[in-house]
Amino acid sequence: SLQAPADTSPSGTDKTFTLPTADGTNGQVLQTDGSGALSFTTISTDPDGAFRSTQVFTDSGTWTKPSGLTRVRVYVTGGGGGGKGRTSNGSEGGTGGAAGGTAIKVIEASSLGSTETVTVGAGGASSNNGLAQAGSGGTSSFGSHCSATGGSGGDRPGGSPYIDGGVGSSGDLNIRGSAPVTSREVVDDSGSPGGDSFFGAGGRSAKTDGTYAHGATGQLGSGGGGGNTSGNGNTGGSGVVYVEQFF
């Protein structure tokens, strides 16, 4: 039996609860349907909105919303700039490229479409045997929710463009990618490493002793390394879109 308290509401209406026909199992509790019908249920130890899975995009594609999704947290990083290699006469090395920016954003499931277009920015091309600046990284985005531009390409010391990292946009947190270690104003015959992104280190630079004549490719979203006076720069790392899914 259940002992009900005295009803003190203005109408004095009695409350009727209908118990289930059988007992539940160990650890279950009674729940109501809001109309007085009671039933036994198991309390979930996995809270609403728990992290369950990820989708990682290193190439452009389509994100599909899973059933039961509560929200996502996305990390969007643009492509890294390419590294500059030696000039045609071999008198100068080159700087590394700058890293792509990053946007981080939490998006509720109700604000997401059944699919979202994912764009992953390509790494910038290297530039060798000339005075031209290396290519910039491409922009990455997650639908229309947030995006991040790519980093600038490396240049020869004393070149005119300023080498700067990309930056996130429309995120809860927008991060600028790192510039290369050696700026354009500094002559460095060994070249310089690429800038670091949120997800990885920039490509290493060449060395004056020729141990590494060429710069290395940047990791995810980071800048490619610059080459020395006898070596080439290398491409920037492609961007990435990392989606954490909560249910």
Image: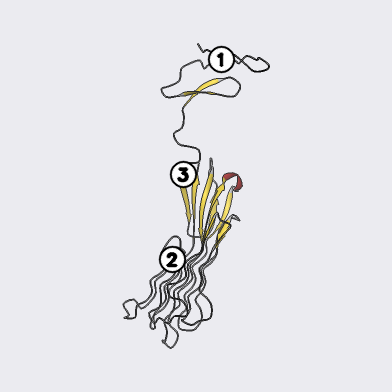
Label 2: state its secondary structure: loop
Above or below 192: residue 2: above
Q: Residues within 10 Å of mark 2 (few under 14, many from 20)?
A: many
Report the label total: 3
Select label 1 or label 2 by which is in front. Answer: 1
Select label 3 or label 1 by which is in front. Answer: 1
Tag 1: amino acid: Pro
Between 223 and 165, the one lying in front of the other is 165
Select label 2 or label 3 by which is in front. Answer: 2
Q: Are marks 2 and 3 in contact (CB under 8 Å)?
A: no
Above or below 31: residue 146: below
Q: CA distance from mark 1 to mark 2?
A: 66 Å
Q: CA distance from mark 2 to mark 3?
A: 28 Å
Residue at numbered disc 2? 196
Q: Which mark is residue 51?
A: 3
Tag 2: amino acid: Asp
Label 3: state its secondary structure: strand
In primary-sequence order, the first of circles 2 and 3 is 3
Where residue 197 appears, x then y in whole percent?
45, 63
Q: Which mark is residue 5?
A: 1
Where residue 142 appears, x then y in whole percent?
56, 56
Q: Are marks 1 and 2 in contact (CB under 8 Å)?
A: no
Residue furthest to the right in view is 11
In primary-sequence order, the first of circles 1 and 2 is 1
Tag 3: amino acid: Phe
Quarter assignment of residue 37:
top right
In primary-sequence order, the first of circles 3 and 1 is 1
Where residue 219 appears, x then y in whole percent?
42, 65
